[in-house]
């Protein structure tokens, strides 16, 4: 029976990692290893993982981790599987500790250099690897992982005591792009700007775009936005774009769920996962490419009645469907290990 858990991850408020910790701590006795403090400076460790085939981070992690395991745990739950190699996982298994890795990235198909070199050799040892992307299933089966699929995370606590208004709304912006830059997202932003659409960009790494000088004035915030401020930014936007990253083999993201759950009209790239969840022009608007998106935005932007109606339907779809209840789904997976 699982009673005591060691949580390994970031506990920075507003992050999905912190929300996951809160979900676990509501039911279980949970101790924490805050990865941001455990490795200091954490950015240096990630540089070593990303760019060098370097054994030191794993040795350092193993040494520090073993020093911190001075209690009996039934389960170790981590969002930072990139640090867990074979030796430490096998040692924990010998002690009778169950192991879960909530993997929000793609260790098998990405541009993260060597970040996942340690993890890829050890992921089969976990009692459960939890993915939120259906596109991960083929990798999990190929690598013989014990895995479960869960819906993308959205933090229901943010809107628990807030009644969203879908009738008399005051918007701060027409079109929002929120998220970390990647090349395809940068190209989409440029195309929208050139078409005359008024967009605002919130997110990191946009200075890497080759057209940065052109799009710079549309970037309103270039640091992470978390918690209530993240919700408010989406809620105050008429239309918010969700574009999964093909370079990571994504076809759905947390924003696919967060945008309608936080009250904005979801403009989502047409993918298999989006098609299965949403009905076009009913609870979201799906687009094929930049040209298609521009056409649909110009058709919608002045029609507040339809924007509010689709937004409200999207909100109901996500908030009322138990399939998107991260808390219930996660606790059910843990219960299956008992």
Image: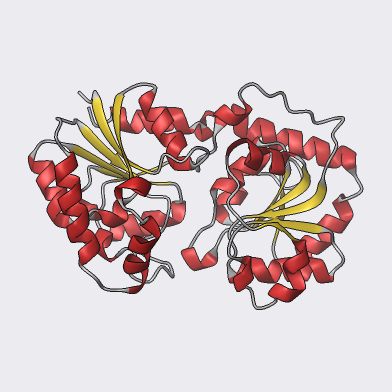
Q: Is residue 328 left or right of residue 166?
A: left
**Picture quarter with the C terminus:** top left
The answer to which image quadrant residue 308 occupies is: top right
Residue in the image at 84% along x and 61% along y: 197
Looking at the picture, how far across and down is residue 277, in whole percent?
60, 43
Is 195 on the left-hand or right-hand side of 200?
A: right
In the foreground, 229 or 145: 229
Measuring from the top left, give residue 33's x and y in whole percent. Answer: 30, 40
Residue 135 image point, x, y percent: 45, 56
Coordinates of residue 262 in the picture (x, y in percent): 67, 36
User: Is residue 102 something that shows in the picture?
Assistant: no
Look at the image and tell me whether residue 248 can be seen: yes
Extreme residue toward the front, this view: 40
Residue furthest right as drawn: 302
- Name the residue at 58% across, 38% down: 227
Q: Is residue 194 found left or right of 246 in the rendered image? A: right
The one of 172 and 142 positioned closer to us in this rendering:
172
Which residue is depicted at the point 56% across and 30% down? 156
| Residue 72 or residue 269, whichever sits in front | 72
| Colour scheme shown | secondary structure
The quarter of the picture where the N terminus appears is: top left
Looking at the image, residue 296 lies above or below residue 153: below
Question: In this image, 249 relative to 53: left or right?
Answer: right
* Extreme residue in the left direction: 94
Q: How many marks?
A: 0
Q: Residue at x 48, y 41 (%)?
A: 16
């Amino acid at each position: 029976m699982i009673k005591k858990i060691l949580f390994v991850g970031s506990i920075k408020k507003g992050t999905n990692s912190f929300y996951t910790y809160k979900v676990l701590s509501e039911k279980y006795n949970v101790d924490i290893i805050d990865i941001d403090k455990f490795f200091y400076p954490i950015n240096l460790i990630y540089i070593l993982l990303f760019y060098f085939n370097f054994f030191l981070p794993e040795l350092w992690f193993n040494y520090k981790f073993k020093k911190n395991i001075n209690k009996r745990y039934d389960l170790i739950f981590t969002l930072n599987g990139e640090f867990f190699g074979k030796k430490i996982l096998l040692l924990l298994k010998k002690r009778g500790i169950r192991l879960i890795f909530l993997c929000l990235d793609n260790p098998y198909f990405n541009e993260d250099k060597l970040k996942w070199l340690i993890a890829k050799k050890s992921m089969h040892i976990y009692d459960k690897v939890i993915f939120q992307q259906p596109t991960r299933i083929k990798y999990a089966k190929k690598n013989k992982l014990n895995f479960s699929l869960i819906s993308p995370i959205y933090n229901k606590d943010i809107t628990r005591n807030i009644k969203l208004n879908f009738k008399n709304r005051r918007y701060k912006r027409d079109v929002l792009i929120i998220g970390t830059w990647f090349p395809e997202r940068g190209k989409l932003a440029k195309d929208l700007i050139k078409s005359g659409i008024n967009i605002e960009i919130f997110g990191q790494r946009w200075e890497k775009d080759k057209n940065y000088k052109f799009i710079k004035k549309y970037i309103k915030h270039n640091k992470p936005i978390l918690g209530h401020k993240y919700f408010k930014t989406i809620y105050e936007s008429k239309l918010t774009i969700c574009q999964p990253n093909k370079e990571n083999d994504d076809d759905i993201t947390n924003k696919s769920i967060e945008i309608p759950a936080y009250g904005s009209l979801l403009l989502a790239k047409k993918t298999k996962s989006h098609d299965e969840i949403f009905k076009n022009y009913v609870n979201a608007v799906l687009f094929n490419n930049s040209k298609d998106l521009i056409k649909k935005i110009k058709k919608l932007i002045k029609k507040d009645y339809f924007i509010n109606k689709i937004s409200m339907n999207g909100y109901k779809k996500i908030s009322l469907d138990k399939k998107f209840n991260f808390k219930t789904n996660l606790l059910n997976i843990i219960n299956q290990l008992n």
